[in-house]
Image (cartoon, grey):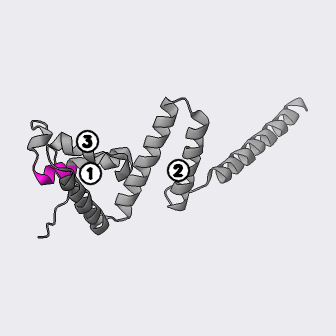
Amino acid sequence: MSYNIDYFSVKIPDNKEPKEYSFVERRADILNMILEAGHPRAISQSELAVKYGVSQVTIHNDFEALATFYENTSDRKTVNFITESVYQKSIAALMKQGEFFKASRILEMWNNWLFNMGKIKKSPDELAQKIEVSWLDDDDDSADDDDDDGK
C-alpha cells in the first residue's frame, strides 16, 4: 500500500503523548528529529521505539518510509534547508563548546557552499579586495584634500 503523505506538513499534536501518535504523526515527529540532529544515524531507533511504544522493527520501517518520502520529494529547496540546518547546528554546537576556530572553519565551508549555490554574489576574498580598494581610494581622496587645504 502506498501513501502520498507530506510529512513536512503534518502538525505534531501538543496535547497527545507520543505513544498515542498515529503512524503519520510519529513519522513526522521522527522527520523533525532527523532534521534537528542533522542525520538519521544521529538518532537511536531503540530509544524511539521506547518513546513511541512500538517495536524497533516499526521504527526501522518508519525510517525506510521516511527515506522513500525524502527521495521522492527532495528538491533543491529541501536539500538547501537541510544543508543550512546542519551548518547552523554545527556552528552553534562548536561555539557553545568554545571551539571558535572550528566554528569559523565550518562557517567558511558554509560560505563557500552559499557562494557555489549562488546564494551570495561575491566570495569573501572578492569582497575583501573591493573593500581594500575602496579604502585606498578614500585615502587617496583625503590625501588630495589635505594637499589642497595646505596651499
Q: Does residue 17 appear to the left or right of 72 in the view shown?
A: left
> Which secondary structure lies at badge 1?
helix
N-term mark: 3 or 2: 3
Q: Are marks 3 and 2 in contact (CB under 8 Å)?
A: no
Q: Amino acid at mark 3?
A: Glu
Residue 9 visible in the shown view: no
Question: Which stretch appears magenta?
Answer: 22-28
Asked whether the beta carbons under mark 1 and mark 2 sit within 8 Å of each other, the answer is: no
| Residue hosting label 3 | 47
Vertical arrangement, residue 46 with respect to residue 73, above or below: above
The amino acid type of the residue labelled 1 equals Leu
Tell me if residue 29 comes above or below residue 116 in the rendering: above
User: Which residue is located at x 56 percent, y 33 percent?
Assistant: 99
Residue 110: give its label.
2
Q: What is the number of the mark on residue 31?
A: 1
Q: Quadrant of residue 58?
A: bottom left
- Which labelled disc corresponds to residue 41? none
Asked if the magenta segment contains residue 64, the reply would be no
Q: Nearer the viewer, residue 122 or 1?
A: 1
Disc number lying in front (1 or 3) = 3
What is the distance, in whole Å, between disc 1 and disc 3 at their CAs?
Answer: 15 Å
Could you give the CA–CA distance between mark 1 and mark 2, rounded to whole angstroms? 23 Å
Closest to the observer, 59 or 14: 59
Q: Which tag, 1 or 3, sits closer to the chain's start?
A: 1
Percent coordinates x, y for residue 52 in the rendering? 16, 43
Q: Quadrant of the N terminus?
A: bottom left
Q: Position of residue 46 (x, y in %)?
A: 26, 45
Rate crowding at label 1 as few (under 14), some (14 to 19) or many (20 or more) other CA atoms within 10 Å.
many
Depth check, mark 3 against mark 2: the one in front is 3
Other-residue count near label 3 (Cα within 10 Å), few / some / many at <14 / 14–19 / ≥20: few
